[in-house]
Image: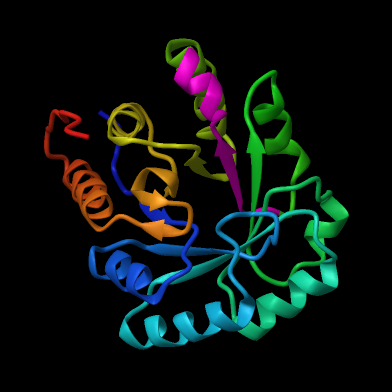
């Protein structure tokens, strides 16, 4: 069984009550999406109001999510909201990333050797986010997991921190944490009732499962949904 010193991030926050619940349940990072094309988009000023209240309650870290946006816009929002991390999901290159004045999480969709290439390509990134292709996971989970195992094994030999995302459910979390120790797990759609609206019961259930695994407790999950 892999070592379980793993962070957990709840992404796509649009409401104060969801941020507060995630924080109360022990999550380490909250993600706010500033890409207008996303159904989970939040205006920076609305995110700022949530972040101000949340930071008064504890030390949860804040990530801002962007995709192929002007660098000046990213830097402006990051400074205004005092983001702990800038998370990039587009075609941003190394020159773009190197100009960001805070830790960068660079997302890639793994497969076809892209994971290994990214570990070397993005020198300025502290963290690589492996975004699992949801459709492939649904159709052929066995093959998708084998590909992921190769990349995670390579990543654990590199100097990059790894975050894993992409429709992670309880079964996927159990699988990942029994084999590997990524720096963080990123949850979004599997703790929602609809995009941008977190489901209280689902969020609590997955966070409790994650915490039990992190403590080294053996647990078999039975999906009741």
State yes or no: residue 136 in magenta.
Answer: yes
- The residue furthest front is 194
Image location (x, y in percent) of residue 208: 19, 50
Query: Closer to the camera, 218 or 2?
Result: 218
Q: How is the image coloured?
A: rainbow
Does residue 224 appear in this view? yes
Query: Closer to the camera, 78 or 140?
Result: 140
Is residue 172 left or right of 41 when viewed as pictured? left
Image location (x, y in percent) of residue 156: 50, 34
Query: To which quarter of the image does residue 42 belong?
Result: bottom right
State yes or no: residue 100 in magenta.
Answer: no
Image location (x, y in percent) of residue 108: 66, 38
Q: Residue at x 69, y 49 (%)?
A: 89
Q: Residue at x 32, y 61 (%)?
A: 27
Quadrant where the image shows the C terminus: top left
Q: Residue at x 46, y 87 (%)?
A: 52
Query: Closer to the camera, 189 or 65?
Result: 189
Does residue 6 appear in this view? no
Query: To which quarter of the image does residue 133 belong?
Result: top right
Is residue 60 left or right of 154 when viewed as pictured? left
Q: Does 138 appear above or below 192? A: above
Quadrant where the image shows the N terminus: top left
Q: Residue at x 46, y 64 (%)?
A: 13
Query: To which quarter of the image does residue 113 belong?
Result: top right
Is residue 43 left or right of 95 when viewed as pictured? left
| Magenta-colored span | 125-139
Is residue 163 left or right of 68 when viewed as pictured? left
Image location (x, y in percent) of residue 193: 36, 50
Q: Does 149 appear above or below 52? A: above
């Amino acid at each position: 069984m892999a070592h379980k010193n793993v962070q957990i991030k709840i992404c796509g926050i649009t409401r104060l009550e969801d941020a507060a619940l995630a924080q109360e349940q022990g999550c380490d990072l909250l993600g706010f999406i500033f890409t207008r094309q996303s159904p989970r988009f939040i205006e920076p000023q609305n995110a700022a109001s949530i972040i101000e209240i949340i930071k008064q309650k504890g030390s949860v870290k804040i990530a801002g999510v962007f995709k192929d946006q002007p660098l000046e816009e990213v830097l402006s929002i990051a400074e205004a909201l005092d983001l702990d991390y800038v998370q990039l999901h587009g075609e941003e290159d190394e020159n773009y990333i190197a100009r960001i004045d805070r830790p960068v999480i660079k997302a890639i969709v793994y497969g076809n050797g892209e994971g290994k290439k990214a570990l070397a390509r993005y020198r300025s990134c502290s963290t690589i986010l492996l975004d699992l292709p949801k459709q492939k996971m649904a159709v052929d989970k066995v093959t998708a997991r084998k590909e992921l195992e190769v990349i995670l094994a390579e990543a654990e030999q590199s100097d990059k921190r790894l975050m894993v995302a992409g429709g992670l459910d309880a079964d996927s979390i159990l699988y990942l944490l029994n084999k590997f120790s990524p720096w963080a797990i990123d949850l979004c759609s599997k703790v929602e009732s609809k995009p941008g609206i977190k489901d209280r019961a689902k969020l609590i259930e997955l966070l409790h499962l994650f915490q039990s695994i992190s403590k080294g407790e053996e647990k078999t999950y039975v999906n009741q949904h």
